[in-house]
Image (cartoon, grey):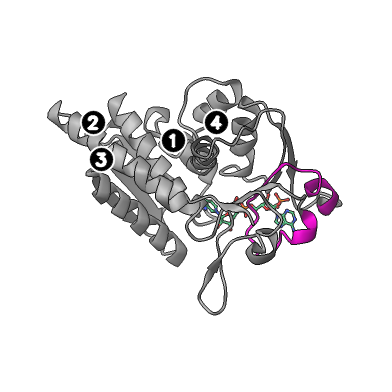
Amino acid sequence: MAVILDGKMLSKKIKDNLKIEVQNLKTKGINPKLAVIMVGNNPSSSVYVRNKSKACKYIGVDFEEYLLDENIKEEELFDVIDKLNVDDSVSGILLQSPIPNSLDINKAFERIDAKKDVDGFNPINVGKLSIGIDSFISCTPLGIMKIFEEYKIDIEGKKAVILGRSNIVGKPMVQCLLSKNATVTICHSKTRDIQNITKEADIIISAIGKPKFVTEDMVKEGAIVIDVGINRLDNGSLVGDVDFENVEKKASYITPVPGGVGPMTVACLMENLVKSAKN
Ligand code: NAP
């Protein structure tokens, strides 16, 4: 049976440390604040934003939400971003994705001041990560690296396979693993024979968004399995991409859903926010 990598416990530990750091910052007159922009009314996004607001409250920082109409024009969205960019009371700006297709999300991320880009999606931060300069790192990959650190999982020289090549998870994950000397393969919807690739992996990180995609026969005995997926089933329950019950028997370490990567993403957002306020 695998060791369960407890992201919920670790995220609490990180937030408890941040709480103390925030108190110290406040004595120096620094009051961190997160501004979140949401365009349109996406129910999943509302849940994510609520979790972020709760985390802000927990560590004692201010939270401000900007709810914009789904028919907003690009220039109007940019106006909101520009105002937040120059507002000294705002330490971090987050644009909740997805946004309507009429808007170009990459242009919007680029518009956010890289120094306030606590999600790490501005091309400046993406580029810095890829060449190893200190930057804001996308919160989900950062959270996964912290799990490895906490459980003293040495990744140097290991074969890591990432499923999914999104800009927010898969691609920054490659850079994080490479920086710790893993050998990285990334798979996507056009990859052939995924099963033969994952079977060779010491570490599998799945960020696809399909329940039970990663089955027991895709996993090598003793592999480390990280499940990023968040999928809502018809019965309302939340599951990841991994067939947990069966894969758990074969893996050496595994993250649960919920309670694995999800809470770590939020904790790392808080860490990026405090870092931004200190800068
Ligand atoms: P995304 O942008 O939709 O990307 C999904 C990726 O999976 C794409 O690269 C896609 O390939 C690949 N893919 C889809 N079907 C595949 C298949 N049959 N075989 C191989 N690859 C396949 O998703 P995302 O935003 O990265 O999110 C992925 C999942 O993680 C979702 O469930 C999301 O809710 C969850 N998530 C969780 C957290 C967290 O904190 N736990 C954070 C972010 C996301 P192509 O590129 O070829 O289309």
Q: What is the C-alpha distance between the residues marked 4 and 1? A: 14 Å
User: Badges 2 and 1: C-beta atoms under 8 Å apart?
Assistant: no
Place of residue 230 in the rendered image (x, y in percent of width and height, measured from the top left): 55, 60
Within 10 angstroms of label 1, few (less than 14), some, or many (20 or more) residues? Answer: some
Q: What element carries label 3?
A: helix
The kind of residue on which mark 3 rests is Lys
* Residue in front for this viewpoint, 53 or 94: 53
Vertical placement of 268 versus 154: above or below? below
For the N terminus, the quadrant is bottom right
Q: Is mark 1 on a helix, strand or loop?
A: helix
Q: What is the C-alpha distance between the residues marked 3 and 1? A: 30 Å
N-term-proximal mark, 2 vs 3: 3
The reply to whether the residue tagged 3 has its Cβ within 8 angstroms of ligand 1 is no
**Residue stretch in magenta:** 195-218
Q: What is the C-alpha distance between the residues marked 4 and 3? A: 28 Å
- The circle drawn on residue 111 is 1
Within 10 angstroms of label 2, few (less than 14), some, or many (20 or more) residues? Answer: few
Q: Tell whether position 226 is magenta.
A: no
Within 10 angstroms of label 3, few (less than 14), some, or many (20 or more) residues? Answer: many
Q: Which residue corresponds to the image point at 36% horizontal and 48% vertical from the top-left?
A: 12
**Mark whose residue sits in front, 4 or 1:** 4
Instruction: List the residue tagged with mark 3.
Output: 19
Instruction: List the residue tagged with mark 2.
Output: 88
Q: What is the C-alpha distance between the residues marked 2 and 3? A: 21 Å
**Mark whose residue sits in front, 2 or 3:** 3
N-term-proximal mark, 3 vs 1: 3
Vertical placement of 255 versus 75: above or below? below
The kind of residue on which mark 2 rests is Asp
- The circle drawn on residue 126 is 4
Residue 2 falls left or right of residue 215: left
